[in-house]
Image: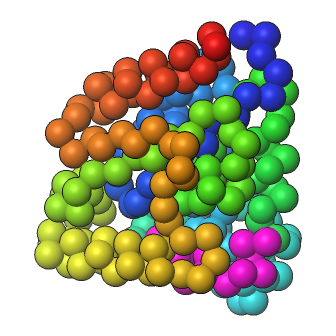
Amino acid sequence: MGTGAFTVAIDGPAAAGKGSIARALAAHFGFAHLDTGLLYRAVGARGGDPLVAARGLTEADLERGDLRSMAAGQAASRVAAIPEVRAALTEFQRNFARREGGAVLDGRDIGTVICPDAEVKLFVTASREVRAHRRWLEVGGTEAEVLAAVVERDSRDAERAVAPLKAAADAVVLDTSEMTVEQAVAQAIRVVEGRLIS
């Protein structure tokens, strides 16, 4: 596709399906994809001073095998609440977003803070119970523990002083609670196609 810079910003809470939708959109349209949560997970996983870790982050750090663990997710949420860490990672994300050929970024503040001028903004959500069940299928443990972790994560992400999790005013909200992945992806593709054509 001969598109220039075209940014799709996808936000939403943990385990709502935004990563699956983002990967599918990138593959469908031939866009680059960045799971911005991996940046924070990688900073948390590197340990030591989070700001030093953020400033020295490389793409190789995003390939670590342990970044999808519950522990990495909790560490990510803690370092993401540090304003200086967020600032250090903002430029990385903005440069990625405006690359030639289009980009899909998924995270928690893409449409509100990182790419407020994105051509498409989606806010992907689902009930806490559905999200906890999905995460439990990924990580195991007990569903009660996973639900408690999801609730704690939601609160921390929504209440942080810098870039709290919320839908952009002009985002299309996609509630995946009752959808299959295929249905959610199809709906997201229709939204992007509408903006590419207009």
Residue 104 horizontal/vertical position (percent): 63, 37
Where residue 31 appears, x then y in whole percent? 67, 26
Residue furthest out toward the bottom:
49
Q: Is residue 4 magenta?
A: no
Q: Quadrant of residue 83?
A: bottom right
* Magenta residues (range): 73-87
Residue 121 appears in the picture as rendered: yes
Residue drawn where x is 55% and y is 23% of the image: 192
Q: Measured along the vertical axis of the image, is residue 193 above or below residue 94?
A: above
Between 181 and 191, the one nearer to me in the picture: 191
From the viewer's perspective, tell me whether residue 100 is left or right of residue 156.
right
Q: Does residue 165 appear to the left or right of 198 in the view shown? A: left
Q: Point out the image quarter for the N terminus.
A: top right
Front in this rendered view, residue 118 or 98? 118
Residue at image location 55% in from the left, 16% down from the top: 193
Could you tell me which quadrant the C terminus lies in? top right
Q: Position of residue 34 (x, y in %)?
A: 65, 45
Quadrant location of residue 155?
A: bottom left
